[in-house]
Image (tube, rainbow, N blue to C red):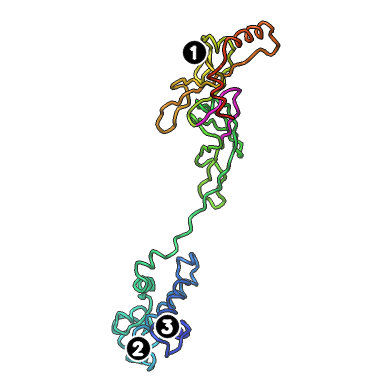
Amino acid sequence: MRDPYTVLGVSKDTSAADLKKTYRKLAMKLHPDQNPGDDKVADKFKEVSAAYALLSDKNMKARFDRGEINADGSDKGFAGYRRQAGAGAGNPFGGAAGAAGGGGFGAGFDAEDLFSSLFGNKAKMQRPKAKTRRKGADKTYNISIDFLDAVLGTKKQVKLENGKTLNINTPVNVKEGQQIRLKGQGIASIGGGASGDALIEVHIKNHAFFNLKGNDIHMDLPITLDEAVLGGKVTVPTISGKIALNIPKSSSSGKIMRLKGKGATDTKSKKKGDQLVKLMIMLPKNDDAELEKSIKKWSTKNNHDDLKNIRKHLE
């Protein structure tokens, strides 16, 4: 073993605190966990640890400075050889030196034990983990579905980048831009790790007359003047089929009628929203002389006081 002062790069008068600081820095840099598979660095780590073990022991350091022991802690001269030989070891600088009382740092020296005792549990926690194989990247795909399919759920085919075709189920009441994750269907890992995921991003086509707000379905319902005045039954579409809606007499344009439970299903509570139908009075496109005559006759008999009072608030 080389001179311990040279190994650690310190002088004989280096303080114990600075000696420990120097060893910490070298040990963290040379530790096998930081350099997996590098036998040369592992041997150097053991050499640095052995050098610190000797110099951090006041008695051993004093004996080495006086020239009584070698760098590996074995005694110098014939006396050291005789003790080691008596212990059955043929090499005065081998692994039996320490066991024979010579204080050697041969094959029996465990640098890892010294590292653990010096750094403790904290060092074990901070010790770098073995590198894991990196997961492959995720891949995003876009699909477009009809409004009713988004509200009610549907099956959709998706062709992946690798040529594979998958049938996926879109959830009930899926939202615009919501992503469906398919585990392991993304980009393959270069390092042999797990593949990434496929992210299916949903985009919803507009409906001709339905509009979704929260879990409620909104729509405008055109009605005739006579339906508004006289009332009547009107067929109304819903996401689950057509129903008959009773229009009350004297219904103003803009009146909203609520159809309970005819909306979308809430994904958490599983409760259904409502359908809100807004009445919109539609007059004939072409002039209707008879209608105009009737309105004028009706208007002369009604002064519309209620309407005039409402308009005063707008002035």
Q: Secondary structure at mark 3?
A: helix
Can you say whether 55 is above or below 157 in the image?
below
Q: Which label's residue is closer to the chain start, 3 or 2?
A: 3
Q: Secondary structure at mark 1?
A: loop
State which mark lies toward you, 1 or 2. 1
Residue 212 in magenta?
yes
Q: Pick the quarter of the image with the C terminus.
A: top right
Left or right of residue 73, residue 258 in this image: right
Q: Quadrant of residue 167?
A: top right
The answer for how far apart the CA atoms under marks 3 and 2 are is 27 Å
Which residue lies under the disc numbered 3?
Answer: 18
Q: Secondary structure at mark 2?
A: loop
Q: Residue at x 55, y 20 (%)?
A: 307
Q: Residue at x 49, y 32 (%)?
A: 214
Name the residue furthest top: 290
Q: Quadrant of residue 303?
A: top right
Q: Pick the quarter of the image with the N terminus.
A: bottom left
* Amino acid at pointer 3: Asp
Left or right of residue 141, residue 182 in this image: left
Mark 3 vs 2: CB contact within 8 A: no
Which residue lies under the disc numbered 1?
Answer: 248
State which mark lies toward you, 1 or 3. 1
Q: Which label's residue is closer to the chain start, 1 or 2?
A: 2
Which residue lies under the disc numbered 2?
Answer: 75
State which mark lies toward you, 3 or 2. 3
Q: Magenta span covers which residues?
A: 202-213
Q: Position of residue 86 (x, y in %)?
A: 29, 84
Q: Position of residue 229 (x, y in %)?
A: 54, 11
Q: Residue at x 57, y 12 (%)?
A: 302
**Numbered tag placed on residue 163 in the rendering:** none
The answer for how far apart the CA atoms under marks 1 and 2 are is 113 Å
* Amino acid at pointer 2: Asp
